[in-house]
Amino acid sequence: MTIAWREKVGLVTGGSRGIGRQIALKLAESGMKVAVNYRGNDEAAKTTEELVRHLGVDCLLVRSDVSDISQAQSLVNTVLEHWGRLDVLVNNAGIVRDTLLLRMRDEDWYDVVQTDLTGVFACTRAAIKPMMKQRFGRIVNIASIAGLMGNAGQANYAAAKAGVVGFTRAVAREMASRNITANVVAPGLVETELTGQMAQEAFQTLIKKVPLGRAARPEEVADAVWYLVQAEYVTGHTLVVDGGFVMN
Ligand code: NDP
């Protein structure tokens, strides 16, 4: 079946910068309209909007905090009011609050779980209604290899990202009969502001463990997302994009 992407609408959470921006551009390359959500960085979001429009595609910026369930619901409602449909949801927004478990404050735990896991739940629950009506939907959630293998200093993040994998599999099973697929992309190290916050020494030590010898470019993660968006017979899958880091 050939899918008429130009008639479709995509939403990328956390699309102002980093991996999310490249995902927004990848969706736009297909001709679909793209809504870009972000939390606060208006300047970065406007740059993404310009880049998407440069591809000849309509773009809607929606500033909202996906860690707040009611804002996540209104984010999806805003897209529906604007374009009347939602076909592709990429739950990409995520934060880290790295620290060893002994020192982890309650808010370090809650902030990460609320953004990285509850945000995915809230946006997905809101999106499946229109997708069910359309009898078409593609959901791609961005997890991390930390959710598959764990990582010292990331108990909060690893738990949230592992939760995203389990959540996605449940959604995939619930929604398969409605022609809605749900999949995960689990990146390893990617060159973004998020990894830029890491101590350079720690970053280089990790890079040495990557068989392909480098971090991923955000575009390489976006390519994996696009594969899962256009795939018709793949659901509940976790696609690892890590240069061979995990390999199990
Ligand atoms: P960045 O820090 O570069 O960008 C984060 C994006 O998420 C920004 O657009 C930010 O908006 C948005 N965001 C953060 N919190 C919220 C919120 N509560 N509501 C709405 N938007 C929010 O991150 P990356 O591009 O590096 O990461 C993207 C995803 O990939 C995350 O889920 C991350 O966990 C995952 N990942 C990243 C890896 C890496 O090495 N970089 C490795 C594995 C997974 P604003 O600009 O307004 O702040």
Image (spheres, rainbow, N blue to C red):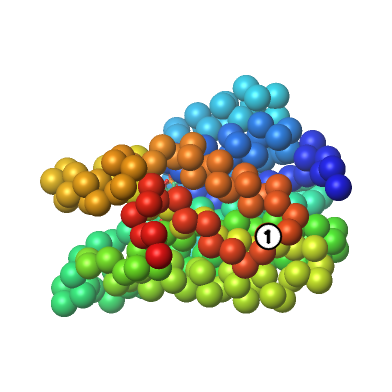
Q: Residue at x 36, y 60 (%)?
A: 246
Q: Which residue is drawn at 28% across and 76% down?
A: 106
Residue placed furthest toward the left: 201
On screen, residue 69 above or below 54: below
Residue 97 shown left or right of residue 201 in the figure: right
Q: Looking at the picture, tell me which residue is in the foreground, 50 or 193.
A: 193
On screen, residue 106 above or below 130: below
Q: Looking at the picture, tell me which residue is in the foreground, 202 or 34.
A: 202
Q: In this figure, which residue is indicated by the disc labeled 1?
A: 234
Residue 208 shown left or right of residue 132 in the figure: left
The picture places residue 1, in percent across and down from the top left corner, at: 86, 47
The picture places residue 129, in percent across and down from the top left corner, at: 77, 66
On screen, residue 162 above or below 213: below
The picture places residue 199, in percent across and down from the top left corner, at: 16, 48
Res. 213 in view: yes
Q: Residue at x 38, y 47 (%)?
A: 243
The picture places residue 207, in percent across and down from the top left corner, at: 25, 46
For the residue marked with disc 1, what is the amino acid? Val
Which element carries disc 1, helix, strand or loop? Answer: loop
Based on the displayed image, in which of its 4 quarters is residue 120 positioned?
Answer: bottom right
Quarter of the picture containing the C terminus is bottom left
